[in-house]
């Protein structure tokens, strides 16, 4: 899956810390107008979000899978059963966005 569309626009993803769902940020960035470092950071962030959601969905399909604590915390958030520790772990792991140098 690529987050590039119209050949120059890069989607940015975040994690909704209330629901544990991935959300596309409304303002994609033009890769011709940002630094290469910013593009790499955004693409790495997107990959983290997509990977986390894929791991959680696999775990939700097969609860016998062995997954990291962060994935279990995110799964509990998605079920509406997070602990305070889960929320803190999720915020540290996924609760940030990439700052773009302009």
Image (cartoon, rainbow, N blue to C red):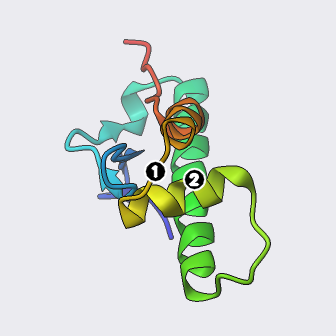
The residue indicated by pointer 1 is 82
Please tell me how crowded label 2 is: few (under 14), some (14-19), or many (20+) other residues with Cα within 10 Å. many
Taking the view exactly as shown, the residue that stands out farthest to the bottom is: 62
The residue indicated by pointer 2 is 73
Where residue 3 appears, as percent x and y from the top left, is 43, 58
Please tell me how crowded label 1 is: few (under 14), some (14-19), or many (20+) other residues with Cα within 10 Å. some
Where residue 96 appears, as percent x and y from the top left, is 46, 29
Q: Earlier in the sequence, mark 1 or mark 2?
A: 2
At x 51%, y 49%, the residue is 46
Which one is in front, 25 or 102?
25
Quarter that holds the C terminus: top left
Circles 1 and 2 in contact, beta carbons < 8 Å: yes
At x 52%, y 52%, the residue is 49
Q: Is residue 3 above or below residue 88?
A: below
Where residue 7 appears, as percent x and y from the top left, is 37, 56
- Circle 1: element type: loop
Taking the view exactly as shown, the residue that stands out farthest to the top is: 102
Q: Is residue 27 above or below residue 64?
A: above
Where residue 58 appears, as percent x and y from the top left, is 61, 80
Q: Nearer the viewer, mark 1 or mark 2?
A: 1
Which one is in front, 10 or 19?
19
Give the number of marks: 2
Q: Is residue 28 above or below residue 91?
A: below
At x 32%, y 37%, the residue is 29
At x 40%, y 62%, the residue is 78
Left or right relative to 39: residue 20: left
Query: Which disc is residue 95 wearing?
Result: none
Left or right relative to 92: residue 7: left
Marks 1 and 2, how far apart at CA: 7 Å
């Amino acid at each position: 899956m690529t987050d590039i569309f119209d050949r120059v626009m890069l989607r940015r993803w975040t994690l909704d810390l209330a629901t544990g769902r991935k959300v596309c940020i409304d303002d994609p960035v033009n890769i011709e107008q940002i630094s290469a470092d910013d593009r790499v950071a955004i693409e790495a962030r997107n990959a983290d979000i997509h990977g986390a959601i894929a791991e959680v969905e696999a775990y939700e399909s097969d609860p016998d899978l062995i997954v990291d604590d962060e994935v279990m915390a995110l799964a509990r958030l998605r079920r509406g059963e997070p602990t305070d520790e889960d929320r803190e772990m999720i915020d540290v792991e996924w609760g940030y966005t990439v700052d773009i140098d302009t």
